[in-house]
């Protein structure tokens, strides 16, 4: 069964996945790459608009062994029986703004993605789909090496879930409008 790394764009999935894949000797399956290669979404279109039922069927044919599966769409295209553990990477929305600006995301795309991270939508959907196989980890303020070690330790010891509450942080900072108003 496969190990899954998911979370919003920019949280550090690919950075960590490459190191973990190397250390564990697991091939990577990149869900976005497969969706693109299968023509399921077009450039400049919102990646969430893709047909997840079609993608799910395509993935079933590919995931027959142990892989490291990476992608923010994991909770919508995989089933609990296909996975060993699902690690949801979380990262402060304040850090994500910088990543998204570097990626030249539009203002709308930045708000959609930071809003999703603040509300914990991917974590929520992962818990609904994968239940006790889901673990969250906060990547904020740690080096890439520290994050790599944390993920390895979660995989090898099933370390427990971290509580992440960006809504609390953003409310305390009086920044709800910054992230949620037009
Ligand atoms: N621990 C970290 N500290 C600082 N920056 C990081 C860390 N991990 C990843 N990054 C940087 O954050 C950006 C997003 O990482 P990436 O792995 O591409 O995210 P994702 O695959 O989730 O979209 C990249 O520029 C990457 O270099």
Image (cartoon, grey):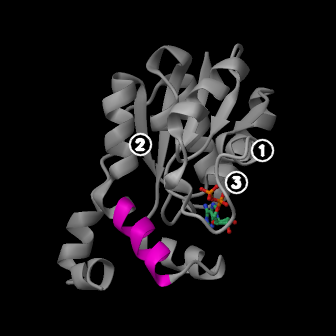
Task: Determine the main secondary structure of the stretch shown in magenta.
Answer: helix
Q: In the rendering, at what x and y percent does residue 90 appear?
A: 45, 54
Cα distance, mark 2 to mark 3? 17 Å
Q: In the rendering, at what x and y percent does residue 32 appear?
A: 66, 47
Q: Is residue 17 visible?
A: yes
- Which residue does the image show at 42% across and 24% down from the upper left? 133
- Which residue does the image show at 70% across and 54% down from the upper left? 15
Viewport quadrant of the C terminus: bottom left
- Figure quarter occupied by ligand 1: bottom right
Which numbered circle lies on residue 15?
3
Q: Mark 3 CB in 8 Å range of ligand 1?
A: yes
Kindly identify which residue carries mark 1.
37
Instruction: Looking at the picture, tell me which residue is in the foreground, 3 or 115.
Output: 115
Q: Which residues are magenta?
A: 107-116
Q: Is residue 145 left or right of residue 142?
A: right
Compared with 155, 149 (above or below) is below
Mark 1 in CB contact with mark 3 (< 8 angstroms): no
Q: Secondary structure at mark 1?
A: helix
Instruction: Looking at the picture, tell me which residue is in the foreground, 170 or 70.
Output: 70
Front: mark 1 or 3:
1
Q: Residues within 10 Å of mark 1 (few under 14, many from 20)?
A: few
Compared with 100, 159 (above or below) is above
Q: In the rendering, at what x and y percent does residue 109 appear?
A: 48, 73
Mark 2 in CB contact with mark 3 (< 8 angstroms): no
Residue 93 part of the magenta-drawn span: no
Cα distance, mark 1 to mark 3? 21 Å
Kindly identify which residue carries mark 2.
136
Earlier along the polypeptide chain: callout 1 or callout 2?
1
Q: Secondary structure at mark 3?
A: helix
Front: mark 1 or 2:
1
């Amino acid at each position: 069964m496969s190990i899954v790394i998911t979370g919003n764009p920019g949280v550090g999935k690919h950075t960590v996945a490459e190191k973990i894949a190397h250390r564990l000797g697991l091939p990577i399956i990149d869900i976005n790459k497969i969706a693109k290669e299968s023509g399921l979404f077009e450039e400049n279109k919102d990646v969430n608009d893709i047909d997840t039922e079609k993608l799910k069927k395509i993935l079933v044919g590919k995931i027959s062994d142990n892989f490291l599966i990476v992608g923010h769409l994991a909770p919508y295209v995989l089933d609990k029986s296909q996975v060993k553990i699902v690690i949801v990477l979380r990262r402060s929305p304040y850090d994500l703004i910088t990543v998204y600006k570097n990626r030249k995301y539009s203002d709308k795309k930045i708000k959609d993605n930071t809003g999703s991270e603040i509300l914990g939508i991917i974590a929520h959907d992962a818990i609904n789909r994968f239940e006790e196989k889901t673990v969250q980890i906060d990547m904020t303020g740690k080096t890439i090496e520290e994050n790599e070690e944390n993920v390895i330790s979660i995989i090898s010891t099933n370390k427990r879930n971290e509580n992440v509450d960006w809504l609390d942080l953003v409310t305390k900072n009086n920044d709800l409008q910054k992230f949620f108003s037009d």
